[in-house]
Image: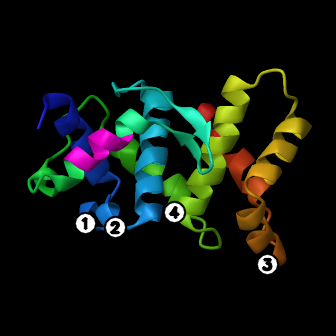
Amino acid sequence: MKKSLQKLAGYLNILNLDYQKFLNDKKERIRAQKYCYLMKKLWNIDLNGSFSLYINGPYNSRLTDDLYEIANDKSAPYIENQGDIPTEKLEHLRRFFIQNEQIDEVDLLEFYTTYSYLKDNFSHLNECEIDKELHYRKTAINNEYETNSIDVMSVIKNIYSNLVA
């Protein structure tokens, strides 16, 4: 495995990526993509390819190939963090997305990264337009939470203000 992928595997291990689950479960692949997007945004980690907006939020097809390479490497789960991001920062990042017991971690990651991508790449949209676009793109997931009176947008905006600060 290339050194850059070993670094990424070390980061993903801190974020508790399940490599076996990754190979067979779309939600785990979404989870990996979204954490990679956040690491790129927050700490400018070196990733192949670039992100574009896709059904499940920001997506990078070249990163997918790299993630499969990592997941298929039997040594990947045992690689320790050897990168430039301290373990504490990665653990802190994950806590933002697992601390809310009412919203699934992957759903929250998908919402948040889509919101962040829209804010960063569609500067012509105001906050109201971003909210509408996000609601449109994530209608099925959003409806599930609205039915249970959970205000996902408030949670996302709170995370955004804390992560960007």
* Residue that mark 4 sits on: 98
Crowding at dot 4, Cα within 10 Å, few <14 / some 14-19 / many 20+, comes out as some
Q: Secondary structure at mark 1?
A: helix
Q: Are marks 4 and 2 in contact (CB under 8 Å)?
A: no
Q: Is residue 66 magenta?
A: yes
Q: Amino acid at mark 3?
A: Asn
Q: As drawn, is 122 to the left or to the right of 95?
A: right
Q: As drawn, is 26 to the left or to the right of 2?
A: right
Q: Is residue 161 visible?
A: no
The magenta segment:
64-69
> Which quadrant of the view contains residue 77?
bottom left
Q: Are marks 2 and 1 in contact (CB under 8 Å)?
A: yes
Q: Which mark is residue 115?
A: none
* Residue that mark 2 sits on: 24
Q: Residue at x 27, y 28 (%)?
A: 84
Is residue 38 depicted above or below 92 in this figure?
above
Is residue 94 depicted above or below 127 in this figure?
below
